[in-house]
Image (spheres, grey):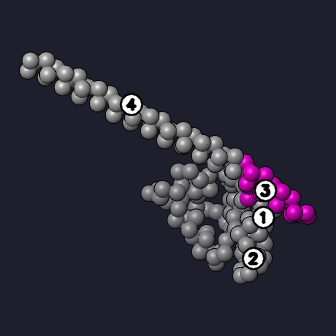
C-alpha cells in the first residue's frame, strides 16, 4: 500500500471569524495558489464555493498548516481533515470532508455505515433496473401496437382499392 504525506491547513482573515479547513497532498503554497486563482472574476469555480467568494471579496487572507501526517488512503486523508472541521467548525466549508460520521476511536463503525450505504444503493439500483425494464417493456408494447395499427390501416387501404376496382 502506497503511503503519502498530507497537510491539513486553515485559511483565515484577521478581520473576520470566517475560516476554511482543507487538506492536500500538494505543497501547501501550490494548493493555496489554486484557491486564489479560482477566486478570480472569470473563474467558474467561485460561483459555488463560499471560500472562493470570500477570497474574491478580500485577498487579504492568511493560511497556516494545522497538521501533517502520512496516510495510506484518501479515506484516511478525509478523516484527518474532518477531525479539524468538527473541532474548528469553519463557516466556509460547505460539505463534510467525509460523508461518514467521524470516529477518533473505533473506526470499525465506518465499515458498518459503509455497508448500510452499500445496501441502500443496491436497493436504489434494483428499483432503477425494474423501472428500466418496465419502460423497455412499455416501448415494446407500444411498438407492437403501432405495427398492428399500421397493418390494419394497410388492410383498410387494400380493401378500399379492391372496392374501387370492382
x, y percentage for residue 14? 71, 59
Over which residues does the magenta segment extend? 98-120
Q: Nearer the viewer, residue 31 or 11?
A: 31
For the residues marked 4 and 2, what is the alpha-carbon distance in whole angstroms?
Answer: 59 Å
Question: What is the number of the mark on residue 109?
Answer: none
Sequence-earlier tag: 4 or 3: 3
Secondary structure of the residue carrying tag 4 is: helix
Q: Which marked residue is nearer to the observer: mark 1 or mark 4?
A: 4
Q: Which of 60 and 38 is in front in this view?
A: 38
Relative height, residue 64 to residue 70 (above, below): above
Quadrant assignment for the N terminus: bottom right
Residue for point 13% across, 17% down:
163
Q: Give the residue at the far right of this rendering.
A: 105
Quadrant the C terminus occupies: top left
Q: What residue sits right under mark 1 in the picture?
A: 79
Residue 120 locus on image (x, y percent): 73, 48
Q: How many labels does the image show?
A: 4
Foreground: disc 4 or disc 3: 4
The residue to which callout 3 is attached is 115
- What residue does disc 4 label? 145
Q: How far apart are marks 1 and 4 (CA)?
A: 57 Å
Amino acid at each position: 500500500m502506497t503511503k503519502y504525506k498530507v497537510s491539513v491547513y486553515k485559511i483565515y482573515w484577521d478581520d473576520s471569524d470566517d475560516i476554511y479547513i482543507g487538506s492536500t497532498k500538494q505543497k501547501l503554497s501550490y494548493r493555496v495558489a489554486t484557491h486564489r486563482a479560482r477566486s478570480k472574476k472569470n473563474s467558474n469555480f467561485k460561483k459555488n464555493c463560499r471560500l472562493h467568494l470570500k477570497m474574491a471579496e478580500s485577498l487579504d487572507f492568511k493560511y497556516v498548516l494545522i497538521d501533517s501526517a502520512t496516510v495510506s488512503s484518501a479515506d484516511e486523508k478525509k478523516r484527518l481533515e474532518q477531525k479539524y472541521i468538527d473541532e474548528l467548525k469553519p463557516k466556509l466549508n460547505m460539505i463534510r470532508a467525509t460523508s461518514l460520521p467521524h470516529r477518533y476511536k473505533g473506526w470499525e463503525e465506518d465499515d458498518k455505515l459503509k455497508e448500510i450505504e452499500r445496501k441502500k444503493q443496491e436497493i436504489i439500483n434494483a428499483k432503477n433496473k425494474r423501472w428500466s425494464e418496465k419502460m423497455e417493456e412499455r416501448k415494446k408494447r407500444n411498438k407492437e401496437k403501432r405495427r398492428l395499427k399500421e397493418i390494419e390501416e394497410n388492410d383498410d387501404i387494400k380493401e378500399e382499392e379492391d372496392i374501387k376496382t370492382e
